[in-house]
Amino acid sequence: MPELRLERVGKFYKGMPAVVEIEYVFQKGIYGLLGANGAGKTTLLRMISGLLRPDSGRILCNHQEISRMGGEYRRMLGYLPQEFGYYPNFTLWRYMRYLAELKAVPPELAEERIEELLEHTGLKEVKKERMKDLSGGMIRRAGIAQSLLNHPDILILDEPTAGLDPRERIRFRNFIRSLGRERIVILSSHIVSDIEYLTDEILLMKSGRLAAGGSLKQICETVRGKIWEILADAEAAERLNQEFVVSSMKNLDDGRVCVRIVSEQKPAEHAVWAEPELEDVFLYQMMC
Ligand SMILES: Nc1ncnc2c1ncn2[C@@H]1O[C@H](COP(=O)(O)OP(=O)(O)OP(=O)(O)O)[C@@H](O)[C@H]1O
Ligand SMILES: [Mg+2]
């Protein structure tokens, strides 16, 4: 099984830092990059995929720099870009055949592999449709199917669940989970619940930096004591919402509101500590 090691990896665009000195070690399992728009997720994933050279630091696969591994690294890798091109008039089947050829999948194995992947991604019924006639969610799934053609040891998925409807997302989560049993999967998402459910470890990115990294439990521990709940009437709840960083407001049956607040200090006399969740950590890192 491969090990991927990031050593102080950084990238600048026109002098502006997009990724700043990221250090992390990936082994078998699913890793989730969580961060706001522009946090540097895609830039980091492109560097890990070998498409973009870091301006500083190194990326090592089994102690070898990936930039020196060439085809050997590419053969280990599957990549779903955030946005990817395809020939709109190709049928899905032809698209998969074409990519299998590009990835040098032996022709005698390609058809069986494509059938298997279309089955797993729920696309078998539409294999004769043209790419331009598929829904956004189906295109996303086709993108994941192609990333798996070469049985990659390292799978990079940039926003794999973007554009999927809730039913597709849930079915798909289970498929992605199964992929992490035998390889390194690194995925990015804005969707906190996807990251929460899918990943073994979370890398929370803020302005290009790694703000927090570790298991869900470890990450949540970083904000313990900073998450509060207050029962308030509607008017007081609105005041709290304006004054503090509020992660949720739940209307109770008795007309009161349970306000969940992320704050270093106790926000009110009758506030009580609450068990931290990933959404709270995300808000804390983004706002506090
Ligand atoms: N090709 C580029 N040229 C110049 N700046 C870029 C380029 N690509 C990204 N950036 C900048 O680098 C920073 C990180 O962008 P990146 O796309 O990696 O973020 P992201 O976390 O993937 O965002 P999103 O959630 O919107 O996909 C942003 O400030 C972005 O504007
Ligand atoms: Mg991105």
Image: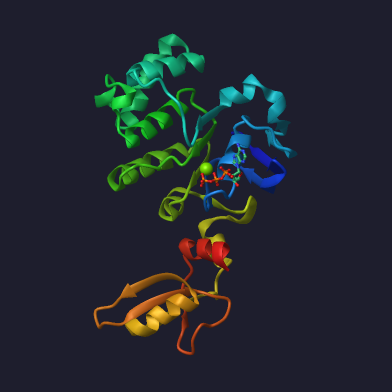
Residue that sits furthest to the front in the current view: 14
Q: Position of residue 191 (x, y in %)?
A: 43, 52
Q: Write the residue at 59% across / 32% down.
A: 49
Q: Position of residue 30 (x, y in %)?
A: 51, 44
Q: Position of residue 23 (x, y in %)?
A: 69, 47
Q: Write the residue at 70% across / 43% down.
A: 10
Colour scheme used in the picture?
rainbow
Picture quarter with ligand 1: top right
Question: Which quadrant of the rendered structure holds the C terminus?
Answer: bottom right
**Could you say which is closer to the camera, residue 207 or residue 26?**
207
Relative to residue 216, is residue 209 drawn left or right? Answer: right
Residue that sits furthest to the top in the current view: 108
Q: Position of residue 208 (x, y in %)?
A: 64, 50
Look at the picture and state if 116 lies above or below 223: above
**Could you say which is closer to the camera, residue 192 or residue 42?**
42
Relative to residue 133, is residue 162 drawn left or right? Answer: right
Relative to residue 120, is residue 205 drawn left or right? Answer: right
**Could you say which is closer to the camera, residue 121 or residue 164?**
164
Relative to residue 75, is residue 195 drawn left or right? Answer: left
Residue 27 seen by the camera = no
Look at the picture and state if 94 lies above or below 83: above
Look at the picture and state if 232 lies above or below 227: below
Tally of marks: 0
Residue that sits furthest to the bottom in the current view: 269
Q: Quadrant of residue 41?
A: top right
Question: Which quadrant of the rendered structure holds the N terminus?
Answer: top right
Residue 61 seen by the camera = yes
Q: Write the residue at 44% across / 48% down.
A: 198
